[in-house]
Amino acid sequence: MKHETIPGFDCVAYKWKVQSEIYEKIKDMTVEEEIAYFRQAAETGPFAHLLGPEYYKNARTPTPRR
């Protein structure tokens, strides 16, 4: 499989942009709200079908930050 490049597309810049947008959404959230945000994104995102319902049923809640 040959990967094609997209002229003018800067992958690293795009990654920084997306991460900055996510940070702005979650910066004032509690740990529990962050967990809910990312779980909802995983459950409804474009790759949700790869994980399946068993993944979410058995998912652990991480220890809150201090």
Image (tube, grey):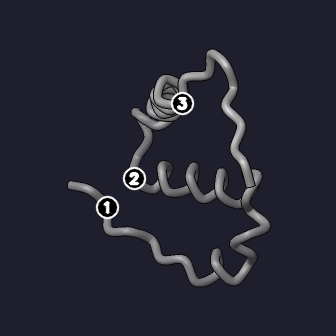
- As drawn, the residue found furthest toward the front would be 2
Label ID, residue 31: 2
Quadrant of image for the C terminus: bottom left
- The earlier-in-sequence mark between 1 and 2 is 2
Instruction: Identify the residue shown where x is 40% and y is 47%.
Output: 30
Callout in the foreground (3, 1): 3
Label ID, residue 64: 1
State the image coordinates of residue 12 (x, y, percent, origin top left).
47, 29
Residue beneath label 3, please? 11
64 to the left or right of 42:
left
Of the residues shown, which amino acid type is indicated by label 2?
Val
State the separation of the CA atoms marked 3 and 1.
Answer: 31 Å
- SS of the residue under disc 1: loop
Dots 1, 2 in contact, CB < 8 A: yes
- As drawn, the residue found furthest toward the left would be 66
State the image coordinates of residue 42 (x, y, percent, origin top left).
65, 57
